[in-house]
């Protein structure tokens, strides 16, 4: 049985020629940012990957097709469509079987990347253990995926809307290496320092690539999580964010926001409460992650 996915001509050519490719997710486009900044950012991110010597492969399900690499028009249509499904491991196959359209979260993008033979993936922030998870059991499927799918995921740390200590503990239990890039502290998405020390630190794309290969040689099934601090000029210090995050959380609770809606709701409220500053930081960090992911992919093929 052939794997059920479609690669764009550009991505297929790169894979055929063993040239570096970086997978990109699409939930950040449909659920993480407003239009038109989402489309502009998606294009800038693809450009960053190209400028650093790799080919970008944005992943989404379009009319039942699992697309690895989106052509410009498909990307534009996805960015403008509202009410698109947000797909994780659990609902990817149902969406495809019904011929539906959906954006892929970190978990579903990792599945697609692995199917296509893409080893590196850049995103903004991963999902994790939500605050209050001891009551809600809200733990992102992204964590399980990192435990079982061998893709190196570059993010800016976990979002400060999550419970970061519980997220780290869970990743340790699952055997996922959490590697801060170029510093000891675990970055927290909009801030460079979460106040927690990352379990691991690497300073070079080459060593990140080497440890990716070493995991494969050991037969370890899961991926690596690279936490790349955003550029200093774009960061929002935790002291400023903390009260806004607390406010967004109590609003989510009051309004009974649950399940898949939680993350998009919190991101949208923080965007509003920071008067757009969180979006500027989000754009800067995803571009920064795309560059590092491309550098790692280049090293993997060297
Ligand atoms: N980071 C962002 N915006 C997003 C996400 C991450 O800046 O929209 C998405 C990612 O696709 C991630 C998902 O996989 O949120 C996690 O959702 P949940 O917490 O429902 O598992
Ligand atoms: Mn959740």
Image (cartoon, helix red, strand yellow):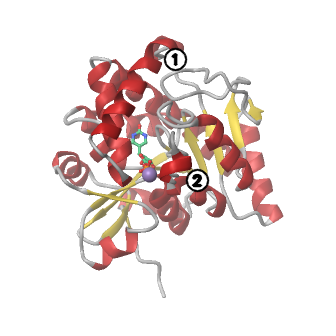
Of residue 138 and residue 111, the one placed in the foreground of this image is 138
SS at mark 1? helix
Q: Is residue 121 visible?
A: no
Q: Relative to 113, does residue 34 appear above or below in the rendering?
A: above
Across and down, in percent, residue 126 comes to 51, 44
Asked if ligand 1 lies within 8 A of label 1, the reply is no
Chain-order first, disc 1 or disc 2: 2
- Looking at the image, residue 291 sits to the left or right of residue 63; the answer is right
Of residue 6 and residue 272, the one placed in the foreground of this image is 272
Q: Say which mark, if any, is on residue 143.
A: 2
In the image, what residue occupies the spot 70% across and 56% down? 174
Of residue 287 and residue 173, the one placed in the foreground of this image is 173
Q: Relative to 230, does residue 301 appear above or below in the rendering?
A: below
Q: Is residue 125 visible?
A: yes
Of residue 120 and residue 224, the one placed in the foreground of this image is 224
Across and down, in percent, residue 62 comes to 26, 64
How many discs mark residues in the rendered view?
Answer: 2
SS at mark 2? helix
Label 2: how many residues lie within 10 Å, few (<14), some (14-19) or many (20+)?
A: many
In the image, what residue occupies the spot 34% across and 18% down? 277
Across and down, in percent, residue 130 comes to 50, 43
Across and down, in percent, residue 223 comes to 66, 55
Q: Quadrant of ligand 1?
A: top left
Residue 240 sits in quarter: top left
In the image, what residue occupies the spot 51% across and 54% down? 137
Q: Say which mark, if any, is on residue 238.
A: 1
Label 1: how many residues lie within 10 Å, few (<14), some (14-19) or many (20+)?
A: some
């Amino acid at each position: 049985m052939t794997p059920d996915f479609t690669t764009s001509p550009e991505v297929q050519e790169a894979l055929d020629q063993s040239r570096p490719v970086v997978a990109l997710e699409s939930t950040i486009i449909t659920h993480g940012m407003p239009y038109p900044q989402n489309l502009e950012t998606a294009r800038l991110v693809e450009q960053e990957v190209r400028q650093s010597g790799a080919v970008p492969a944005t992943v989404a399900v379009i009319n039942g097709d699992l697309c690895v690499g989106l052509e410009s028009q498909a990307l534009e249509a996805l960015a403008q469509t509202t009410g698109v499904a947000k797909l994780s491991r659990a609902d990817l196959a149902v969406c495809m079987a019904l011929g539906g359209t959906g954006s892929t979260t970190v978990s579903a993008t990792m599945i697609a990347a692995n199917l296509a033979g893409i080893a590196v993936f850049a995103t903004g922030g991963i999902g994790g253990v939500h605050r209050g998870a001891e009551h809600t059991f809200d733990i992102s499927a992204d964590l399980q995926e990192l435990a079982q799918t061998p893709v190196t995921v570059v993010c800016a740390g976990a979002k400060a809307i999550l419970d970061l200590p519980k997220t780290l503990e869970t990743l340790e239990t699952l055997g996922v290496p959490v590697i801060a890039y170029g510093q000891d502290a675990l970055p927290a998405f909009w801030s460079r320092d979460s106040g927690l020390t990352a379990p691991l630190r690497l300073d070079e794309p080459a060593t990140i690539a080497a440890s990716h290969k070493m995991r494969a040689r050991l037969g370890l099934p899961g991926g690596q999580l690279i936490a790349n601090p955003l550029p200093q000029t774009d960061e929002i210090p935790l002291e400023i964010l903390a009260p806004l995050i607390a406010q967004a959380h109590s609003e989510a609770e009051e309004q009974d926001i649950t399940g898949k809606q939680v993350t998009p709701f919190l991101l949208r409220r923080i965007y509003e409460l920071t008067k757009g500053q969180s979006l500027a930081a989000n754009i800067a960090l995803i571009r920064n992650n795309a560059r590092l992911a491309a550098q790692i992919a280049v090293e993997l093929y060297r």
